[in-house]
Structures are given as structure tokens and as C-alpha cells.
Image (spheres, rainbow, N blue to C red):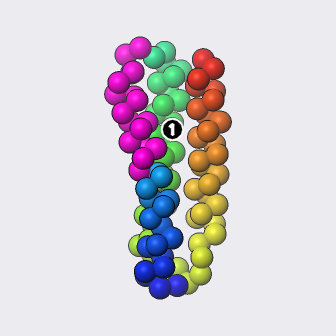
Amino acid sequence: MSPFLRRRLAVPFIAFSAVFLFGTGLGAWAYWSGWSMAERLITVFLGIMFAINLGISISIGTDRRIDDVPWLRIGTIVVFFALACGVTLVRRSL
């Protein structure tokens, strides 16, 4: 796989992960004092998940050993986003 194609594949994942990580951080900064301990812990968990997503997304674009489409990494990112949706629903129901 060419470096251009790897980067082109990674850019949307990097963008989504960065936006969600930024949103989680901004929300934590704005509402931290009004949240319960459970909501704070869930927010920290979401931040960690989006940071891991961002790291995996960056690794897709920078890992030169990738010869084919990195389906396992892409699947991990998709699963983490789906898990984050479920965790967010739990946090909203608190």
C-alpha cells in the first residue's frame, strides 16, 4: 500500500477521533463541577477511548509495514466508536 493511500485512508479516522476527543475534553472542562462521580468517571473513560482511537488512526497513516488495508485497526476504531455511543447513552441516563 502506498504512503499516499495509507494517509488518505487514515485522515477521516484521525479527524473523527480528534473531534470527539476535543468535544469530550471541552465538555469535561465546562461541566466537571456539576457532574456526579459516575459521570466524571464515564467521561474519563470516553476520553481514554477516543485517545486510543486517535492513536490507532495515526498508526494507520504512519506505519510503513502495512501492505494491505488494515481491517483489524479499522474494525477496532469502529468498535470503539460504537462502544462510546453506548457509554454515552448510559451517562445520559444517570
Tally of numbered tags: 1
The residue sitting at 50% across, 27% down in the picture is: 41
Q: Position of residue 16 (x, y in %)?
A: 48, 52
Give the left or right position of residue 85, taking residue 37 as reference: right
Q: Which residues are magenta?
A: 18-34
Q: Specify the quadrant that holds the C terminus.
A: top right
Task: List the residue tagged with mark 1.
Answer: 46
The residue sitting at 61% across, 39% down in the picture is: 85
Q: SS of the residue at dot 1?
A: helix
Q: Is residue 50 magenta?
A: no
Toward which corner of the image does residue 34 lie, by quadrant? Answer: top left
Q: Is residue 21 magenta?
A: yes
Q: Is residue 22 above or below residue 3?
A: above
Q: Position of residue 72 (x, y in %)?
A: 63, 66
Q: Position of residue 66 (x, y in %)?
A: 52, 79
Label 1 packing within 10 angstroms: few (<14), some (14-19), many (20+): many
Q: Main secondary structure of the magenta part?
A: helix
